[in-house]
Amino acid sequence: MKGLDDKVAYRHATKAGNRGDVWKHAILFGVARRLIDQHQHRVQDGSPFLYAESHAGPGRYCLTKGGKWEKGIGSVCGASLTPDIAKLFSTDHEEYRGSWVMVRDLLQQMGCPGRMKLWETDPEAASAARSNASPQEKVCTSDGFVGVASANADLTLIDPPYRADDDWRAAGLLAQTLHSQGRSFLLWYHIAWPSKPQALVDFLGLPSHEALWAPFGEMPSQNSKGCGIIASGDVEHFLADLNLPQIAQSFHAKYVQRYPAPQART
Ligand SMILES: C[S@@+](CC[C@H](N)C(=O)[O-])C[C@H]1O[C@@H](n2cnc3c(N)ncnc32)[C@H](O)[C@@H]1O
């Protein structure tokens, strides 16, 4: 796939705990909790909850002074958040748990057996992920856009770095595939300018939930202005219970919903 080498060069370590992670991980936590709860009620034989990630990262990050986390988890005001979400970001300012480690801890807290299928192409990040993983968590080093499509997971996080335009196309096609399989997923994207998020929302015909922390200005620029999450139809209604405007406000962002354009729906 074109651009794979570019994507391999991406390292999340300097960005861990940034504003995009606050939005992604608060929503992931809320949705995972509801799905695990449903799973526990539905499954009587103790079968594990299967979680998958297309772009997993190492799972644990050391926070260093001056890192992007200072404007993210470092600036979250927990006062208006529910205690469980506030606790997610009440960091010791030394280490931050990435997405799948957070879900693993949640499974343990809820007493639910879990399995994970994780994809990570960067050799260093994959090796760190393997040392952070337990035997129930399998880390694959092939392309996550391909691998996760046949994982048949109870919840999938699609979380590419969007370093190449190709990531937008591949993320949309993967979400469409999971949608057609009736799988629950969350798809995260960053926003520099609204045209790519709008094209993605139009392509999928699903709304998105955005946190914006800077105005777009008059001309396209590459600076990060916010981020968004698209949820599969079956988990979309969980988001209403999460009080997304308050979560956005807790890190000085504004909550906005993006809808498919009317002509894209026909
Ligand atoms: C945004 S980070 C992941 C963060 C993680 N999901 C979290 O929230 O804690 C994206 C990761 O995707 C990896 N990556 C890039 N292209 C990939 C691909 N095609 N398949 C799997 N992993 C890839 C990068 O090496 C990077 O570690």
Image: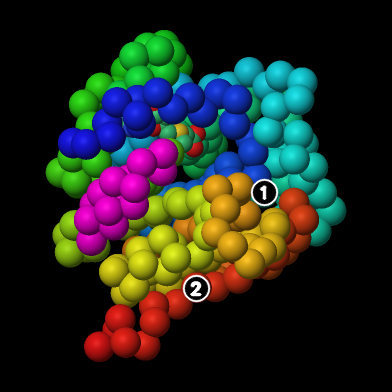
In this picture the colour scheme is rainbow
SS for dot 1: helix
* Numbered label attached to residue 85: 1
Q: Give x and y (percent) for residue 24.
A: 54, 48
- The residue shown at (65%, 45%) is 19
Measured in 3D between alpha carbons, the distance from the residue under mark 2 to the one under mark 1, in whole angstroms, is: 24 Å
Relative height, residue 117 to residue 175 (above, below) = above
* Numbered label attached to residue 258: 2
Mark yes or no: residue 47 visible: no
Near-viewer residue (106 or 140) = 140
What is the span of residues highlighted in magenta in the rendered image?
162-176
Q: Is residue 35 left or right of residue 94?
A: left
Mark yes or no: residue 100 visible: yes
> Does the CB distance between marks 2 and 1 fall below 8 Å?
no
Answer with mark 2 or mark 1, whichever residue precedes in sequence.
1
Residue depth check, mark 2 versus mark 1: number of the one nearer the observer: 2
Label 2 environment density (alpha carbons within 10 Å; few <14, some 14–19, many ≥20): some
- The residue shown at (48%, 24%) is 11
Can you tell me whether the CB of the residue at mark 1 lies under 8 Å from the nearest atom of ligand 1? no
* Main secondary structure found in the magenta portion: helix
The three-letter code of the residue at mark 2 reads: Arg
Q: Give x and y (percent) for residue 36.
A: 41, 50
Q: Is residue 44 left or right of residue 239?
A: left
* Numbered label attached to residue 76: none
Relative height, residue 48 to residue 32 (above, below) = above
Q: Give x and y (percent) for residue 159.
A: 40, 43
The three-letter code of the residue at mark 1 reads: Ile
SS for dot 2: strand
